[in-house]
Image (tube, rainbow, N blue to C red):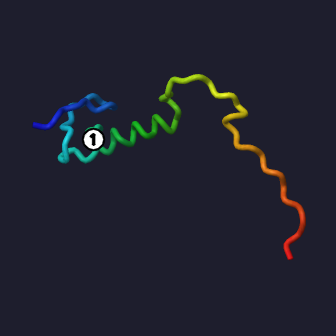
Amino acid sequence: MAARVKCPTCGKTVAWDGSSPHRPFCSERCKTTDLGAWAAERYRIAGAPLDQAEELPPSEEPRGGTAH
């Protein structure tokens, strides 16, 4: 017997086996809704704030000269 989990989006019970192609979600719709929530930054992962300088890549110096 396959384990059963609840869909993280709607709460519907889903079998955790090959018969559920969208697991842990119950459907493509719930899967897409969850992805949209991440893209809209409605979910956050706890952690210490990063210093802004750590978030940005180092600036690159413009390259001088001309191509020959």
**Mark 1 crowd level (few <14, some 14–19, many ≥20, 10 Å Cα):** some
Instruction: Give residue 26's position: percent from left, percent from top.
Output: 26, 39
- Which of 14 and 63 lies nearest the eye of the viewer? 63
Q: Which residue, given by chain and number where applicable, does mark 1 sit on?
A: 23
Residue found at x 90% / y 66%: 65
Please state if 22 lies on the left or on the right of 55 as rendered. left
Circle 1: residue type: Arg
Residue found at x 14% / y 37%: 2
Please state if 27 lies on the left or on the right of 44 as rendered. left
Please state if 44 lies on the left or on the right of 11 as rendered. right
Quadrant where the C terminus sits is bottom right
Q: How many marks?
A: 1
Look at the picture and state if 64 lies above or below 46: below
Instruction: Give residue 49's position: percent from left, percent from top.
Output: 62, 24
Residue found at x 54% / y 24%: 47
Instruction: Give residue 6's position: percent from left, percent from top.
Output: 25, 30
Instruction: Give residue 9's position: percent from left, percent from top.
Output: 34, 32
* Furthest residue in direction bottom, as rendered: 68
Secondary structure at numbered mark 1: loop
Look at the picture and state if 66 lies above or below 62: below
Look at the picture and state if 63 lies above or below 27: below
* Furthest residue in direction right, as rendered: 65
Quadrant where the N terminus sits is top left
Please state if 58 lies on the left or on the right of 2 as rendered. right
- Which of 6 and 55 lies nearest the eye of the viewer? 55
Kindly indicate the quadrant of the structure image that contains residue 12.
top left
